[in-house]
Amino acid sequence: MHYRDRFLKLDAAAHEALQIFQVDKHPSYMGIGRAKEGFSVFGMLNKCVTPMGRRLLRAWFLRPIIDIEVINNRLNTISFFLCCEEVMSALRGTLKSVRDIPHMLKKFNSPSSICTSSDWNTFLKCLCSLLHINKIFEIGISEHLANKLQNMSIDLVEKANSSITEELDYVSNLVIGVIDVQRSKEKGYETVVKENFCDELDELRMVYEGLPDFLEQVSENENASFPFSLECRKAPLIVYVHQIGYLMCFFDEKISDALLVGLEDFEFAFSEEGEERRFYYHTQKTRELDNLLGDIYHKILDMERAIIRDLVCRVLQFLPQLTKAVNFAAELDCILSLAIVARQNNYVRPILTEDSILEIQNGRHALQEMTVDTFVPNDTKMRSAGRINIITGPNYSGKSIYIKQVALVVFLAHIGSFVPADSAVVGLTDRIFCAMGSKSMTTEQSTFMIDLHQVGTMLRHATSRSLCLLDEFGKGTLTEDGIGLLGGTISHFANYDYPPKVLLSTHLTEIFTENYLPQSEHIKCYTMSVLNPDGQTSNEDIIFLYRLVPGQALLSFGLHCAQLAGVPDEVIQRAASVLEDIHSQRPVRRMICDKLVAKDQQYQNAMAKLLAFDPRSDDLNNFFEEIFPPRP
Ligand SMILES: Nc1ncnc2c1ncn2[C@@H]1O[C@H](COP(=O)(O)OP(=O)(O)OP(=O)(O)O)[C@@H](O)[C@H]1O
């Protein structure tokens, strides 16, 4: 099989119809800001704790596989974790501090970025957590669990051991040997390299830390050697300014020109205004200090950066091993996420098979079941016969939800996830086609055209391994055209020796009454059952049971839906009366409303007056005034 064909294909319309992903824009003005995942299947199944896990799970969702071995491996691992919850929660706790190491190293290696001690701390924690994963497997997996792993032929522990290798320990020790993450906090300036790591650096740092005392002493000596006595509030002080060097600082007032004459080597540098005015001068002594010590702080930083660059180069030599470990963590994260969701929502392990069949017992819709109090599960059975299911039923009775839930079970099974059902046997599926009237296409097409486009693709490309969903295809045009197209589509599929699995919901029940459908064992009709206590077509007291049963529905209960949707009573009453007249083949009655009744009365009165009018004795003007009274 070609590499490309090893994935279950879903186009954008199918993704949208099944709500696999949903982007919620940032609520800020014009949606500027980071979008987040909305209410979607991915959003629901994504309980990953690492960014790499989330990325990998998204990739799994984008490319569901049709390789039974890989799927079963994932399913086995999920089954295993569901048996040992402590191991699962310990692993998730540990995974929380695993970061994207290759990304971090890229940042460390970039000449423009500055890595702080907290970055190194995170890096070390991450290495520690990765190594801890192996420890959890070592300690947490009892003999009983180890046997289970062996029986299920899961190579989890072996994979962990081969992915998280001793090199990580070496890298961790390498970093610990150079970096002291506490140092900058203790010293109060930016420094991360350990003490005693480099003598030259230690010496520089010692000088830098002793600089304030040393400069105070030098200042005192200098002040004593001035040729005049200074009468100022605060004695001048030699200070060290980063990147400028050493300067003699005078407080409050600039040295007068008269005094400057006696200080030949004094050169004014700059002044600083503020609460305390300061005037800085280069002097013979400060120049001496510049030559002797130089810009010591930046010397320290440069030296540290050189050391760290060297360290990063060494760490980068282990990039393949680190990447492998992180990739394993990402995969573990995805599996744990799927396991958590399976446990929380009572999902069951699907059985994947090469046969193109589908048998679901008490299947549920992964998203819809979250939004209703009681979700009614339904069965699906598609073997060699009954592969084309035509589902009819009133509006709002759960047809669309049912066909989508079947597709979602198939989709999730191909990801290697447990599925929302009591049991599921899922035949490998090559493609899921959806013609559900979704408007995901960017091209400007009418709704009907989009439907036709999707059904056209489906008819051309569906194989016996495909799953085709058609929701109310043919409703967007004249009824006759719609029925013709729908009948043609079903006949096309029915003519296959082994048709694709087709789930089709429709309100065009005329296809059953005329000879639109061929006699075929492939076609099976279902309907959504409704409890109608009166057994009448009345809109009151109808209860949707959301239960799929064999048969056909002939009523749509559209008016009941209108009532539920809050359509005004008078509109519903009028619709009911029109329906009644059409059913009993009577001419449609006129609509009765107060305005029309008043008008009818007015005409009746006028008629009565006209009949009572005697042209010989009555006055014509009075007569007209009575019929058309003057307006006030
Ligand atoms: N199995 C179920 N259990 C509980 N509630 C359900 C179930 N299926 C559907 N519903 C509820 O019924 C509503 C309508 O479902 P759905 O959209 O599938 O109806 P429909 O038959 O396709 O309607 P229409 O023919 O008008 O498109 C859903 O929003 C959901 O609240």
Image (cartoon, rainbow, N blue to C red):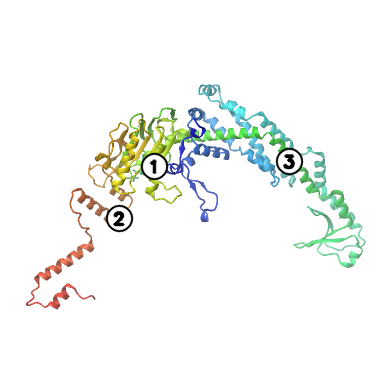
Q: Quadrant of residue 400?
A: top left
Foreground residue among 125 and 552? 552
Closer to the eye: label 2 or 1: 1
Q: Position of residue 31 (x, y in %)?
A: 52, 53
Helix, strand or loop status at disc 2: loop
Camera sees residue 624: yes
Q: Earlier in the sequence, mark 3 or mark 2?
A: 3
For disc 1, the neighbor class at 10 Å (few under 14, some 14 to 19, many from 20) is few
Helix, strand or loop status at disc 3: helix
Foreground residue among 286 and 66? 66
Instruction: Residue 456: give its label.
Output: 1
Which quadrant does ligand 1 occupy?
top left
Q: Which residue is mark 2?
A: 568
Going by the numbered disc 3, the residue's amino acid type is Arg
Q: Earlier in the sequence, mark 2 or mark 1?
A: 1
Q: Earlier in the sequence, mark 3 or mark 1?
A: 3
Q: Position of residue 592 (x, y in %)?
A: 21, 59
How far separated are the C-alphas under marks 3 and 2? Answer: 75 Å
Identify the residue at the far left of this view. 616
Q: How many marks?
A: 3
Vertical position of residue 359 compared to residue 489: above or below: above
Please indicate whether residue 613 sits to the left or right of residue 457 in the image: left
Vertical position of residue 231 compared to residue 327: above or below: below
Vertical position of residue 222 compared to residue 417: above or below: below
